[in-house]
Every structure is written in C-alpha cells, then in structure tokens.
Image (cartoon, rainbow, N blue to C red):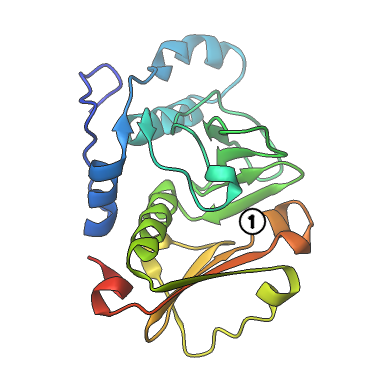
Amino acid sequence: MTADDPVSPIPVGPDGLSRRARWFIQADGIRLPRQDIRHHRDAWIGDGIPAAEIERAANFQDRWGGLALPPAPFYDGGPRILDAGRPEGPAAEGWSFPAGDCRVSMAYGFMIGPDGAFGIDGHQWTPLHASTDGWVESLALAAHARRWATTVTRLTGKAAAALDLGGYEPVPEVQGVIDTWWRGKDSLVALYRGEAVGLDAPQCLEVHIYEGLDRWGLHGG
C-alpha cells in the first residue's frame, strides 16, 4: 500500500506485529488521510537530502502514516498521529525524520533515527525502541496490562531506580532500547527511561507495575 491508495478509517495492523498489537490497532486505532511525501522528493533532493533518506521516510509513511492511536501512558501520550516529516541531518548519528506531532508542547520531538529506532530528540537523540513496531507493541501491551491487572503501581525517581527486576524476563516484542518491558510470574513491568536519559533528568525515571495477572493477562496473544 502506498500513500495514494484509498485508506479505510478502520486500520489493519501491519504484518510482523503480534496478534495483541494487531487487535489493538484495529480496535482502538483510527486511520486518517496521510500525505504522500514522495511529492516532495525533487525539492528535498535539491536541498541536499539524500534520496535514500526520502525513501526511508516514505516507507515509514506507507506502513504507519495517518495512524492515530490512544495516548501512551508516558511521554504525555506520544505522537498524536504517526506521520513522517522532512528528513533532518546529517547529525553525528546520521539522518533522522519526524514520526508525528506531539499532543502537547514538549521539550523534545518524536523521531525515527538513522537505524530505524523510534525515539525522542531534544537535548540529545534517545532511542526508545528499535523500531516503530516496538513502540506500537508497547502501547498495545500497556493497554492490555491495564485491562487485566488487579493493581497498578507507579514508581518514580529513586524508587523506580531501586526496583529489583531479578526473576523477570524482557518482553522481546517491544524491542526495547532505552525503554523496556519485563514479564514476571504474575506481573508486567514497564520501565520508562527516555526522559531521564534524554533530558539528563534522573527524577523523570518512571516505572509502571501491573500485578495480579493470569497467563492470559501476562501474554494476551
């Protein structure tokens, strides 16, 4: 599918996602009309943007452009709508491009990095997940965990940093880099380190603990 193809307002989860994430997109997401950034190709190349970077942003747009998802539980909700923008660079790390506008005024923006990671960029580039798939998987897992947990505990700052994750295993589908999810015997733990690292603000470290989960609650597809 390209940006010129007709788009149903009922989104279909892209291939490669977990069943839980596909269900989340289809049940809670909305697909809005998306811009075809390939229309800007000649002008952007004239401005010195490499053709490969334009195509990378266009491929993101084909897969994710125009998808509106419920707010994330951190980062003041994440992007309002996933939407690729004009590539920016070159920086020390390489080229990046915007992943969508913030819902509120923030000290950083949401970006796709040189290696495809989804992250935040303010004082410095901070990759949260290895791909946008991982970001969407994390949203789906948070929605699932909230639905099935009997208790939810929020820790911040030093209390979050002191949390012992011994006996927990990482949740691979979220493709965690700076942010990670962990699965225990009857609980899930979301570790949000992006603002603490990216803004050099340890007090912004936050952990969400979802407890009282049965087997379905721990996995959910």
| Relative vertical location of residue 109 with respect to residue 184 in this rendering, above or below | above
Please provide percent x and percent y for residue 178: 59, 62
Residue occupying the point 40% across, 27% down: 58
Q: Please provide percent x and percent y for residue 110.
A: 58, 39
41 sits left or right of 216 in the view: right
Return the residue at label 1. 194
Given residues 6 and 125, the one toward you in this image is 6
* Quadrant for the N terminus in the image: top left
| Depicted 24 relative to depicted 205: above or below | above
Instruction: Look at the numbered disc 1 and give the secondary structure of its residue.
Output: helix
Residue at 54% in and 26% down:
50
Residue at 57% x, 52% y: name it. 74
Residue 205, compared with residue 72, is above or below; it is below
Q: Say which amino acid is labelled 1.
A: Gly
**Residue 210 locus on image (x, y percent):** 45, 72
Counting from the top left corner in percent of width and height, residue 203 is at 76, 63
